[in-house]
Image (spheres, grey):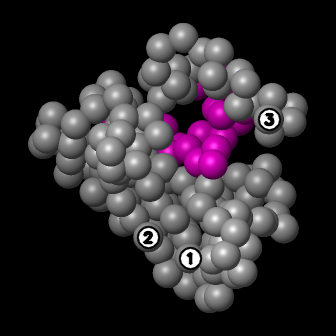
Amino acid sequence: MLHGEENTILKKQKGCVFCNIASSPEYDNENQVFFRDEICFFVMNRFPYNPGHFMIIPNRHVGEYENLNEKEVTYIAKMAQIGCKILKDFGADGINMGWNLGFDAGAGIPGHIHLHLVPRFKRDTNIMTTVFETRVYSADFDKIYEEIKKISKKYL
C-alpha cells in the first residue's frame, strides 16, 4: 500500500484513530504497533519528524493530560525511559520527547493524547528543512519499523 493510500484510509476511519488502533491488535503490523499492553501502546508516527519517530499512546481515550489517572501517568513515564533506550540503540544522538496538548499546541489528534519520542541525529537539519520547510528522508520506513520492533524486544 502506498503511503498516500494509507493516509486516505486513516481519514475515512470512523471515530478516534488511536482508539481504533488500540482496539485492533490484529492489525499491529499494518499500523506499525511494536508494543502494547493493558495501559498503552507504542506506534510509529505516520508523519515522522525523523526516521524512528514513534509515540506512546494510552489505550484509554483521554484528551487532557490532567485527566490521566496516576497509574497511567507513572506508567507512561516509565515506558518513556524504555523508549529512550530503544532510540539510543537505534542510533539516536539525542531525543526530543513531548506532548502536544490540544490543537493550538500542535496536536494533530487533540482528542487522544500521545507522547512523541523523536530521535535526533548529528546534523539532521539540512537546507530542505531550514529554507523550504520540507523534510526529505532517504529511508525505508517499513525497515525502520522492523528495526525498532526488533530493538524493543530487548526492553519490552
Does residue 131 show up? yes
Q: Nearer the viewer, mark 2 or mark 3?
A: 3
Q: Is residue 106 left or right of residue 136?
A: left
The crowding category of the residue bearing disc 2, from other C-alpha atoms within 10 Å (few below 14, some 14 to 19, many at least 20), is: few
**Residue 59 in the image, given as x and y percentages of width and height:** 38, 30
Between the C-alphas of marks 1 and 3, the distance is 25 Å
Q: Are marks 2 and 3 in contact (CB under 8 Å)?
A: no
Which residue matches tag 3? 4
Q: Are marks 1 and 2 in contact (CB under 8 Å)?
A: yes
**Residue 121 in the image, given as x and y percentages of width and height:** 61, 81
Q: Amino acid at mark 3?
A: Gly
Which range of residues does the magenta coloring cover? 25-47
Which circle's residue, 2 or 3, is located before the other in the chain? 3
Q: Nearer the viewer, residue 82 or 127?
A: 127
Write the residue at 70% across / 63% down. 134
Between the C-alphas of marks 2 and 3, the distance is 26 Å
Which circle's residue, 1 or 3, is located before the other in the chain? 3
Splitting the image into 4 quarters, where does residue 5 fall? Answer: top right
Relative to 81, residue 9 above or below: above
Tell me if residue 40 is in the magenta stretch: yes
**Residue 6 in the image, given as x and y percentages of width and height:** 75, 30
Write the residue at 44% across / 34% down. 109
> Which mark identifies residue 120?
1
> Total label count?
3
Which residue matches tag 2? 96
Relative to 151, residue 69 above or below: above
Q: Nearer the viewer, residue 53 or 33?
A: 53
**Residue 62 in the image, given as x and y percentages of width and height:** 28, 29
Does residue 37 show up? no
Q: Amino acid at mark 1?
A: Arg
